[in-house]
Image (spheres, rainbow, N blue to C red):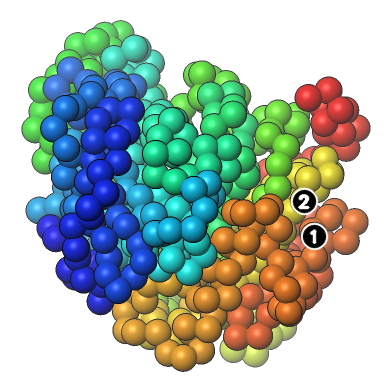
Amino acid sequence: MKLLILLLVATLVRCDRIVTTTNGPVKGISLSPKKVEAFLGIPYAEPPVGPLRFAKPVPKSSWEETYDASELPPSCIQPLLDDFYFNPSPAGNMREDCLYLNLWVPEGGSDSKPIMLFIHGGGYLSGSSNMRVYNGANLAEHGDVIVATINYRLWILGFFSGLIEDAPGNMGMYDQIMALQWIKDNAKYFGGDPDNIVLFGESAGGYAVSALLVSPLSKGLFKRAIMQSGTAIVPPLTNAAGLQVVSQNIAGFLGCADENDTLAKNPEAVVDCLKALPSERFTDSNLLINAGPLPARIGDSILPENTNDLFRKGYFKDTEILLGINRDEGSLLFTLQMPALLGVFGERAETAEFNETSARQFVSTRVGDVSYGIEEEYFGRVRRIPGYTYVRATADLYGDLIINCGTVFHADYYSLRDNPVYFYLFDYRPDSTPLAEWMGVAHFDEIQYVFGNPMHEEFTKSENQLSRNIMDKWAAFAKTGNPNIRGRVKWPRYTCENPKYLVISKRDRVAVRPDNNRCELWRNFFQAVIDRDTLRRLKKTQ
C-alpha cells in the first residue's frame, strides 16, 4: 500500500540519498513539502516463518541491491477484533513476515539527532506500526528528531510458549530488543546519535518500555524513556491464567494438543503441529474468547523475575523518565471488557442494566479479592454523587487498577533514587471523538497529539496548538532529559515528598498528587511497598 493516504497531504518523491546500513543500501522517499525523508519497511530480522515460527528473532542477512524503503510494512498476524472502535489491521494487510521498522529523518541540521523509538500498544494482541496515527513525519519535522516505529510479533506468534528453545515465549519482546539493536547499530548512517535513543510507548507499548528498563538484555541500548498510559508495574489479577495454561488451551483449540499430547508431556510435538498450521488460523478472535490473552513469560533472560519484583528490588536503569495518564483511563478499558452491554463506543452505558451487584461481580471475577475499603472508595461515590453510576465507578476503579496506580508507583520508585521524573495528566477530550460523553478523556486519546496526526477529522485550531505543545515537550525531553520549554508553564519534577505533575490541556497547569491518594489503597494489592533503603543503596552501588 502506497503512503498517499497515510502520510496526510505530503507528496511522495524518491530520495536521491542512498543510505548504506550494516545490512546493505536502502533508498526511501522525501515527503515534500515536509523537510523529512522516510525510510519505510526496513527488515531488521529474518522472516519468522516456517522453522522460525515461535523462535527468537534471527538477525537479517545482508543484501547487495538497493532496498526499496518506500512502503509501510504489513501488520503482524493478530486476531480480528470487531468489538473495537478502530481496527488497526484489516485482514488483507497482515503477514507473518512482518519484522520491519520505519524511520522518519529530518533533512539537514545536526548529524547527531536524538532518535525517538516508538513501541505501539494494543495489549500485545493487536496494533501495527503502519497505523496512520503513528506516522512519524510531523513529529520528526516539528521536533527535529528522528522518529522510528517498529513491528513486533503479537499474541500467539509473539507470546505462546512451550518452554523449549523452539518456542520459548516472549518472542515479541525479543523482537523489540533486536529492532532496538538494529537502530543503535545504524543510527549514525541516518544522522542519528546512537547514544541518545529515547524509547516511548503507549499502553502495552508503555509496558514494553518499562520492562526494558529492568531487562538485563537492554543494557546500553537506550538513554531515557517515556511511558504513556502503561508501565510494567501491573496488578496480580486472579483471572489471568498462567502462561502454560493459556498456551495449552490455544494448542487444544487449534487441534494440536489434547489430554494425551500436552505441552507438559510432549512440547516438541505440540509446537511442530502449530508450526504446520496456516497463519490465518491465528487470526480467529474465537481463540481469544476461549483461551484468553497470553502473559509475558517470567524467568527467562529478558525478564528473569516478575517486573513488579524487579522494580521493588531496585533493579532498574537509572535515567530520566517522563510518564503519565489520561484523565479517564478506565472508561475505554472497561468498555472493551463489556462491549455487548456498554456498546463499542460506550453508547449504551446510560441504559445498561449494571447495578452494585453487577459491579461487585465484575471486580470479583476480573480483579479478585480486594478490600472493602477499596470497593467503597469507588462504589460509595454512587450514593454520594448525583448522576454518578456504577458504570462510571467500575470504570474508575478499573482505570486505577490497570493504568493509573502502576504509573504512580513507577514514578515513586524512580524519584526515590533521585532520578528526574516528569509526570503528566492529559486532560483534553478530542473534538471529534466517537466515544460517548461519559467516557471523558479516554485511554489512547493523547496519542494523536503526540504524533500530530488526527485520528478522525482534521484538528481544530486549539487541537493544532495542543499538538505542537506536546511535540515540543516530548522532543525537548528526548534531546535533554527535561521537557521544559522557555516561556511555557514550568513542568516541575515529581517526587514522593512533593508529587507535582503537569495537567496538559488547552492551558497547562501544575497540580499535586495525580491519584488524590487513591493508589495508597492499592499499594499492598500491587505488592508495591517501598523499601527506601534498598532502593537508595542500589543506586550507590551501580
| Front residue (pair 137, 190) | 190
Q: Gap between marks 1 and 2, in whole Å?
A: 6 Å
Name the amino acid type tagged 2. Pro
Numbered circle sitting on residue 493 = 1
- Is 317 left, or right, of 228 in this rendering? right
Q: Residue at x 43, y 72 (%)?
A: 452
Residue in the picture at 33% in, 28% down: 22
Residue 214 position by quadrant:
top right
Count how many numbered circles sit on residues in the image: 2
| Whole-percent x, y for residue 468 in the image | 52, 76
Q: Is residue 93 left or right of residue 449?
A: left
| Disc 2, SS | loop
Q: Amino acid at mark 1?
A: Arg
Q: Nearer the viewer, residue 213 or 281?
A: 213
Identify the residue position indicated by label 2 in the image: 420
- Tell me where residue 142 appears, x and y as whole percent: 48, 69
